[in-house]
Image (spheres, rainbow, N blue to C red):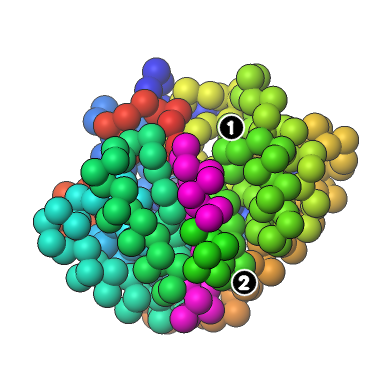
Amino acid sequence: MTDQTYASMPEALVVGVFDNHTHLDPSGVPGSEVLDYHAHLDKGSSVGVRGVVQVGTDVDSSIWSAELAAIEPRVLASVAIHPNEAPRLEAAGTLDEALAVIDELASRPRVRAIGETGLDYFRTGEDGRGAQQRSFEAHIEIAKRHSLALQIHDRDAHHDVIETLLRVGAPEKTVFHCFSGDADLARIAVQNGWYLSFSGTVTFKNAHDLREALEVAPRHLLLVETDAPYLTPEPARGRLNSPYMLPHTLRAMAAHLGTDVSMLAALITSNTEEVYGLWDAEPVTAPRDAYTDATFEMPPMTGSIRLPYLDDDPESTP
Ligand SMILES: [Zn+2]
């Protein structure tokens, strides 16, 4: 990462929107500026980011995500074992145990999605693909059993992701998080009623394929996300990302589609609530509210805090 600090705030949106995929857990990027979840959410609120889906990538971060959603009204949780984590756990003989934890978390009230799960052929070699595939299919089953949305991570594995979804049957609400395909993949997703979630990559100068995909997607299947702390949109590409940077991506999408930013925000908000439900449908646990109860502290994540993609280039897709 070239500059491990946060950029200044964009101009606030007039109509608010949700960030449907972010990682607010302490990332531990060595030497980087640190914001706690309050700061991320407060800065987001001040520019019109109404709430987020906090996404887990392993057992610890999934528990953390579920516990944060239970106490913070602006947060819903998504829980999963990341596709690059699955082969590691399988090798250690603990993948089934980890999947059982995800299944348990899936029944908690403010956990509304299973993800990110899927296939990643960029970082996982041939030898890890069996475990990755098994983990992906297990996550699909958990999502269907609990009637939750599914957040797909697809990196260099478009064909096999689609094949798996069609063969085992996709959950009713399936989201391609950080959509990375072209117009052809977008058409396949759209035919199946799957949602396309665009991240800061859609603002990148050379991302012509992504913008073509954006054009072919019907508006009722569009979502927006940051995938913070990475994939920071222009004009702050290379800096750290946070939900408050979402307006840059939304504005770039609206400009490319030739539509009004507020209209697009309203539409994406409605799509987001369609997929995950309402942020206030289930109340947070009183009185363990982090704002009103000064004695409450988020439980620390146990074990090592390590996102599966930290050792890689900062602009790669988590
Ligand atoms: Zn992610």
Residue 127 is tagged as none
The earlier-in-sequence mark between 1 and 2 is 2
* Image position of 23 with respect to 212: above or below: below
Q: Which residues are magenta?
A: 143-163
Residue picked out by circle 1: 201
**Residue drawn at the location 57% of the way across and 38% of the way down:** 180
In the rendered structure, the answer to whether residue 221 lies left or right of residue 67 reads: right
In the rendered structure, the answer to whether residue 200 lies left or right of residue 96 reads: right
Q: Position of residue 266 (x, y in %)?
A: 79, 56
Q: Residues within 10 Å of mark 2 (few under 14, many from 20)?
A: some
Quarter of the image where the N terminus is located: top left
Q: Is residue 288 visible?
A: yes
Q: Position of residue 170 (x, y in %)?
A: 56, 67
Q: Residues within 10 Å of mark 1 (few under 14, many from 20)?
A: many
Quarter of the image where the C terminus is located: top left
**Residue drawn at the location 70% of the way across and 61% of the way down:** 193
